[in-house]
Each structure stands twice: as structure tokens, then as C-alpha cells.
Image: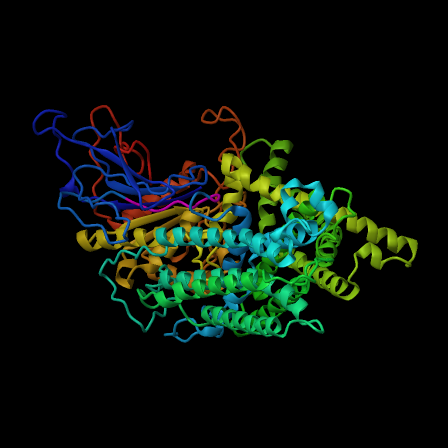
Amino acid sequence: MARVTTEHPVPARRRATARPRGGAGGETRTAETFRRTVRPQTTRRTARPPARGHRRPGRDPPWNSWSTESAAPHPRRCWTTRTRSGSPGTTPPPSTGAPPTPTPSHGPRATATAPCPRPTSGATSPPATAAAPCGCCCCRSWSSTSPTGCAPPPAAAPAPSACTDCWSGSPGLTLHGAVRRALRVALDLAAWQCAGTRACAARHSWLGFLAPGAGWWSTPGRRLALAAAIPTALTGLLWYLSHRTWSAYESQQPPHHGSAPEAEGGSADGALSRPGFWYGRRLVARLRAAHTAVGLLTVAAALAVPAAHFDRRPGGPALLDLLGWLLQAALAAAAALAVGTVCRRGRSEHRLDRRLDRHLVRGLPLGALLLLLCAALYAGWARPAWHATGRLAADAAFGSLTLVQGLLVIVLSLASLALYRTLPDPRAALRGLGGPAVALLACALGGVMTGGVAQRVADWLDGDGTSIPGPPVLLTWQASVIPPLLVVLLVLAARLALRARRLARAGEAAVARDYPDDPPDPARTHRIARVRALAGLTDEAPRVVGVTCAVTLLLGAVALVGGLGFHTTPAQAAAGTPRFVAGAADTAQALGSWLVGLGFILFVTWGRRAYKDASARRTIGILWDVGTFWPRAAHPFAPPCYAERAVPDLTWRMATWTGATGGRLVLSGHSQGSVLAAAAVWQLPAAVRRRVALLTYGCPLERLYGRWFPAHFGPAALTALHRDADCWRNLYRLTDPIGGPVRVPGGHAPDTGPAPGADPCDDVDRAPLKDPLAYGRTPAHPLPAPILGHSDYRADPAFAEERARLLARLRPDLPAPRPATGEEADADGSGAQGSAGRSSG
């Protein structure tokens, strides 16, 4: 669960005067909840009466709160605004992205808005199975060790250069896995192989009109042209979904709070502080046009290449041969234009780029569609001597695409190593190779999904396994290397289990030191130490990912060489070798084929279960939050970036409130909410940042984001945030597998507290919180206290202590509320809860 909370002290002179409820002059309190469904353009307003915790006349807490929860179990709850009467209100942000208009009133505003992350694909996002590789590609584009992706930037760096956009977007152009799967199934397996074989077509009646000699549609080119409607429609669907989410997210201009003028010169505070960072309207529109064009051109090439190959035979028609060359040249030119669109800079972070290349955005897909129609006409031309035999002639392009993906990953790895040497960071994951590793996993995931679909469809079409040649040989080789990869993964899992066991045994002494006054309980001690050890395995993720990617790259190279070199399956290539080698090859081929299909089914089932089951959604939501946090700068078919709406809105709320009241704020965030809070503070002008205090808990800023995205959340960026904010305190537990210390350079060690007499705000990290709160049974805990891990930080007294300290620091002269008759004020002076019925501090 991700939580963002904003608190501000309320001066005593603005507290409400006690008035009787109801009747003339009575106190009126309302609680309105604005919820935006999966279509953010639609706003539904419902009114609900004050719930439990209603404030009594004459008693107000010393602070009001702005709170937002973004939780995976609520896929449709995307905007929540609570408004308390007697405080200056603002209308909720309209769907056009214009800033809300303040309305005059009395007292401080108490409201917050932030969009929630989408745990699974909904009505506005591409299907999870198609968007996962695209999301990985987008994450890769932000994981560079340099903010510009090409070289260390100066203090006022220009916008990301062309080399950044080109290297970030080029791998994404190869990740049209959904289109490739549709091409492989519809054109090759169904239209070319099965419909071109009488035995296979007779087995499936719906292919009867395409069988040889059955009529006008029976020629190979016309069968391919008809089957091309499936990948074309899929490309159109992806364009529609991307355009829909683009209209809801990237097209919404961030509210302008007027505190910081837009400047082209940039900021020295990092990329996340630039005004245009969360406004990718122009870039995503360009990427959508380029990727849509590439998808359509891929379908056109699948139609034109087989026909042109037939026309180039000796004695073939010269006119058709010439048309084939011209069409292929036009396809190559259009593809070069699409690549140039990606490589050319279309993202400006130093200002709000309101331009939209309408001619390019509209003309590129329409031009590709026109070429596709020309390719369909060319392929459908009558060729009486043309017969479908073997696999589709465009099969070699599949191997070439795999080779290009591998070469791009290698080039990205070399570039990342060069960048890491210029800006070394010991905590960076894989020494700066995190981006290429994620790109490799995206390519491998797309290949597995393509192979799984093709293999299962081939088995369904060819029941006896003798009618059609089946999927490309390269897919069989790729499936055959999966069993060795699983063996490596099992070895890694066993090593992690042994390491966790050793850490648990070594940590029992530390658990005993943390609870010196309780009688020892070996089982309880071992359980706590075991949870701590398992939580510490998160830091082993870079090593596991590195080994997995290295083995994947090696096995992928073996599969590519085998598929392109032998042109036969591994079992056939191993014929004549020793019995052990032949048996291993045959076993790997058979087992890999089943594992590919099983993996694809499990992947789809996993995504479907996450959409329905809240517990599974919370687990997957961790990766989903990371993947959808970043702007879609590499692939427009990735899930939409919820932060493009959350961060500007939260920034606007803080900037306008501090500007209108001159007050100060405490901004607290849990888990992913702490990342949103940091991003929002970075967007504030420097003068406003000094009026904001941060309280983070369960914070993955350094443990996850700082290691995998060092250019944006590295030590320099976090140190600058600590320096600019009024105060920043971070809470974490050793049992938390996600959150951890921030490790700002110059502070105390993460496992110790500040020196006696020192200002606690000189350091960010508080000493690790005890978890569980009580070791044994106590009157306050009649049952053993649960081990909380990543949840319920607010239940720890340390949270209330740090919150009270920050509030007192912001307004030390704030008097405590006067308790009502028969009630005592809380220890932190908060008193009773407000009309929202819950504490949001």
C-alpha cells in the first residue's frame, strides 16, 4: 500500500468557534469524496455524512491533514478528496488539467488528491500480457547512471540528447511481441502452412475456403492478405488503447501554481525537479505514431517479402519484380523515418512543451497503413504457379530481429559501463548494468510469449504432427535452452535459502539484544531472526538478476547460432552424436516445448488472478508500482504513468496552500507514497521546499530506486533533497523487505541514532524500529505481537513521536488544543480525529 499524507499546523486564531449543531447558525460539516474511475475524464461526486470521530463543538485538533491512499486492492479508486467545512476549498482538478480555482473561505485548507497506481491492466491500459515487456523497456530507459543517458551533465544540462532517445527507444521498436505473435499464428501457421495443406485444412472446416483449389481466396498471396487483417486489427487496438491512456494521463497539462516560472535553462537540482519531467504529451504522441507505423510496416513486410521472393525467380514477371523492389524500398524508407522519429529529440524536460507534431503523429501511421494496403494488393495479385510450401519465406527475418535485439543489448551494456566509470556509485545495481539487464529480460519475456503461443497453436492445428512444418526452428532452439536456465535458477534459489538460513542463525543474538528484559523464547527468537533474514534477501536481487541475465544471454546466443546454423531442431542436429548428447538434446527439446506453453499459461493466469484477487494484486503491485511510476519515454504501449497526474497535483496543492497561507507542511509517505512525496517536493520551488518537512516510512527510495535508478535517486539526489527540505526523517524496520534506510552521506550509521544533543534533522534515518513491538505477552499485548514487516508503521510509537517533533519544529509556538469535558488530549496534542473519521497523520 502506498500512502501520501500532508499535515500542517493550524494557528489558534483560526480555530472554529463552538456553535450548536443544526438550525440557524449551526455548525455545518461535510465530507465529500470525489472518485475518478478508470476513465479519469469522468468525475462522480457523492456526499457522505460525517462518520465516527466527528469533532465536537469547541474542540479542534492542532492540525488538519491531507491524506491519499493509493492501494492495489482498489483498482478503480483513483482520486480521493476530503473537504472539511470552515476551510478554504478548491474545486477538484478538471479533466482538462487546468489548475483548480480557489474559493474564499476561512481557516486552513485540508484536502489532498493523488491518483492511485493501477495494479493490473484495466479498461484503459493494454492487456498485462502484452504490456509487460513494454513496461520493462520503459524502466530500462530510466535506469541509466547519467541523467542525460549519454554523458555526465553540467550544472545546466540541455535536454536529453538524440543519443539518449535513440538508445532508449530503439529496443522498444523491436518489442512488438503481440504483433509478432499474431503474424506467426495468423500468417505463417494458419494461412500459409495449414490452409496451404489439404490434410490440415480438411481437419479445420473454417479454413476450407482457403484450401488449395477451393476458390478465389485459395492463392497464397490472398490467403496472407486476408490473414493480415488480424495483426493489423491488433495494431489498431494497441494504438487505440495507447491513445486513450495518453488522453487521460500525458495530455493533462500539469497545474501551474505560479511559483516557479518555466525556464529553458534547466535546473541544477536534477531531472525530477524540471517542470516538464511529468509532461510527456509530445513525446508519447511521437512514440505512438512511430510504434504504430512499425507494427503496420511489419505486417506489410510479411506480405511483400514472400511475394517478392517468388517474383525474383528466373523467368518471373518483370513488372511484378520491379514493383516488389519498389515496395520493399518504400517499406525500408518508412521504417527509417519511424526510427528517426524515435531518435530525434521529442522530450523537453526544462519547460512544459505544449507542441504537438500533428502532421507527423497523423501522417506516419496513415502512410504505413497506405503501404500495407499496397502490399496486400501486391501479394494478392494472381500468380498461378505460386504454391505454399514449407514455412513462410519471411522466417529468416525472425532470426535477424532476434540478432538485432541481442546486439542492441550488448551495445547498451558497453555504453552503461562507460557511463558508470564516469559516475561510479558503489550502491548502483550491477555496476550500472541494470538497464541492459531489464532490456534483456524484456526481450526474453517477449520471445517466450511468442514461442508459447506459436507452439500451442501449431499443436492445435496439426493434431498428428505430420501435416505442417510447425513454428520456426529458432523458436524450438529457444525453448530447448529453458531447462538449463531453470537449473541455474534452482541453484540460485538453493543458495539464497542457505544464505537466509545462515543469516537467521547469526541474527538470533541480535534479536536477544533488542529485547533484553524478556525471558528468552527460542522459537520466537528464531521466527523474528528468520523474517529479518528473508527481508535482507532483497539486497541480493541485483546479483540474482545479473546471473540470470548472463546465463540468458549465453543460452540465447547458443539458440541463435543453432537455429540459423543447423536449420533443424536440436534433436535432429544431435543425430549421430553420442547417446548421452542425443538424449539430452531430445529431452531438452521436449521439456522446453512444454515449459514454454506452461509458462505462457501461467503468465496469463497470473495476470488474470491479479485482476481479481486482492492478495495477489498486492504482491504484483510492488513491481507494477515501479514500472508505472516512470513516464512512457521508451514504449507508448506500456501501462500509463500514474505519477504524471499524481506528482503535479500534489505539488500544486502544496505550493498553492503555502503561497496562500504562508504556512508550513509535513508531508509523509509510506512505501511507494514516499517516492511520490519525494518527487512532489523536487517539483517545488526552492523557497517552498524549505517550508516542507518529510516523514517517510517503509521507504524504497534508496534500497530499490537508488540502486536501480541511480541517475534520479542516487546519493547526490537524495542528499540535495535532504538539504533543501526543512527536515526529513525516515523510519524503517529490519523485517521490511521493501523499505530501508536512505543512507544520506554524512549522516550517522543506519543502525544507530543521532549523537546526544544533536539536531535529529541533521540525519535522515532513525535507528531501526523494533518489530515486533513486544517480544512476549504483556497486558497491552495479551497475544504475541505480530511481526509487521512492511505494514502498519503508524502503530509504532516512533511514528507519533517523529510526527509530533516535525509539527513542533514547523510551529513551535502552536498551543495545544483545549480538551473537552471528560476527555484528555492525546500525547502528541492531536486530540480527537477529524470529520474524516480516521487519522491521516
Q: Is residue 113 magenta?
A: yes
Residue ID at (25%, 52%): 664
Question: In the rendering, at what x and y percent does residue 737 appear?
Answer: 54, 45
Q: Nearer the viewer, residue 215 or 370?
A: 215
- Visible residue check, residue 541: no
Front residue (pair 839, 213): 213
Left or right, residue 801 beside residue 831: right
Residue in view at x 47 percent, y 39 percent: 791
Q: Quadrant of residue 302?
A: bottom right
Q: Position of residue 319 (x, y in %)?
A: 59, 73
Q: Quadrant of the N terminus?
A: top left
Name the chief secondary structure element in magenta: loop
Q: How is the image coloured?
A: rainbow
Q: Is residue 505 left or right of residue 690?
A: right
Q: Is residue 469 left or right of residue 809?
A: right
In x, y percent, where is residue 776?
A: 54, 29
Residue 210: tell me if it is visible: yes
Percent x, y for residue 788? 50, 37
Q: Which contiguous range is marked in magenta?
A: 112-121
Residue 626 in magenta? no
User: Which residue is pictured at 45% across the width and 69% down the height?
Assistant: 341
Which residue shows up at 60% across the image and 56% down it?
222
The quarter in which the C terminus is drawn is top left
Left or right of 611 on screen, residue 444: right
